[in-house]
Amino acid sequence: MSKFWSPAIRSLVPYTPGEQPKVLDLIKLNTNENPYPPAPGVTQVLRDFPTDRLRLYPDPDSSKLKTALAEYHGLDNSQIFLGNGSDEVLALAFMAFFRHNKPLLMPETTYSFYEVYCDLLQIEAKKIPLDSEFRINLADYDQENGGIIFANPNAPTGIALPINRIEQLLQRHPDSLVLVDEAYVDFGAETAIGLIARYPNLLVTHTFSKARSLAGMRIGAAFGHPDLIAGLERVKNSFNSYPLDMLAVETATASIADDAYFKDICQRIMHTREHTTAALTGKGFKVLPSATNFIFVTHPQRDALEMMQALRAEKILVRHFTRPGINQFLRISIGTDAEMAQLIDKL
Ligand SMILES: *Cc1c(COP(=O)(O)O)cnc(C)c1O
């Protein structure tokens, strides 16, 4: 604390990211990174990049990547927004769409950054409990609101909602912006991108950090009606005109170009997830049904924090959340088969 801190930041409770250890001999299953490298084309781009171009500012619109994503998803460039990681895209969306005098509705258990943005931007967050099986019940969101946000699949539960429920929610709330954070959608859930042509109240966000193995590059995207995208561009251009650097645009575009590689690593991770789920269930763990690259697990006789610490002593990092209601769970990212064999053995 310093006397120079402005009043609004004194009471902030910032987001705590998972540990990024400085030593390398750990099995890192705590931040949902991809265990496989980015597509080979990404390496090629980095090897061949003409360094002299770095003298210049990047394209403020990242048009090359927008065009690649537009083609990939069957959209127009005007329906796509890009940012420095989806965390930044989310922050700009909160600024653009959720500052009303009505509460933003979100699941009680979801990506904890949402309430941090509310805190920072002085938006009232109203948390809606999950059901007894840790599922989102969208009927509970039928109340006065200044917007609705949830992750699908949700985090850290891993559970996905069917797309027809999301469509019903969009129909029931034509005057509310509904933001669906699809950070994990490529691991077995269905994307809502197909709905944006019919629902001007839908914004979908994606990240290149999880399924595309580019967390170190910081690339995120939003998809929605051109009027929503224009709103995001207004905020972006009032904050940082060049959120994506040249290397981010080139590597992300190379990733999109190699769909066979992308589908293959997603399949491998899903296969490893199912195998790990079966093995842990066999050892008496309860594993929530995951459509992501992590599993959320609890054991009826073992304390989750103790298990987390014991795994750490064995050089395996997993994530534990202290919040009541989920503090007996561990969130375990899906690594390679060899890493998961180690984890299963130690557990
Ligand atoms: C990882 C994650 C993000 C952030 O992604 P970045 O693009 O790395 O900023 C956003 N939402 C959810 C639910 C996530 O798990």
Image (cartoon, helix red, strand yellow):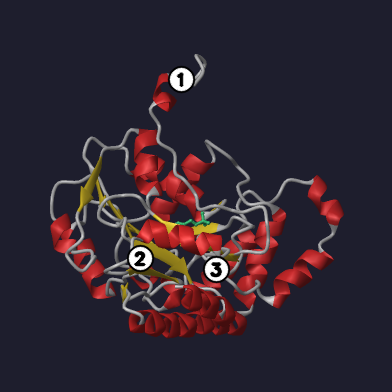
The answer to whether the residues at label 2 and label 3 have Cβ atoms under 8 Å apart is: no
Residue type at numbered disc 3: Leu
Judging depth in this view, the residue of 215 and 318 nearest the camera is 318
Which label belongs to residue 196? 2
Quarter location, residue 282: bottom left
Which label belongs to residue 146? none
Looking at the picture, does residue 170 appear above or below residue 186? Answer: above
Q: Residue at x 33, y 33 (%)?
A: 122
Residue 307 x %, y %: 42, 63
Which label belongs to residue 69? 3
Which label belongs to residue 6? 1
Residue 309 x %, y %: 47, 57
Is the residue marked by circle 3 packed among few (<14), some (14-19), or many (20+) residues within 10 Å?
Answer: many
- Earlier-in-chain disc, 2 versus 3: 3
Residue 259 x %, y %: 58, 81
Judging depth in this view, the residue of 43 and 179 nearest the camera is 43
Residue type at numbered disc 1: Ser
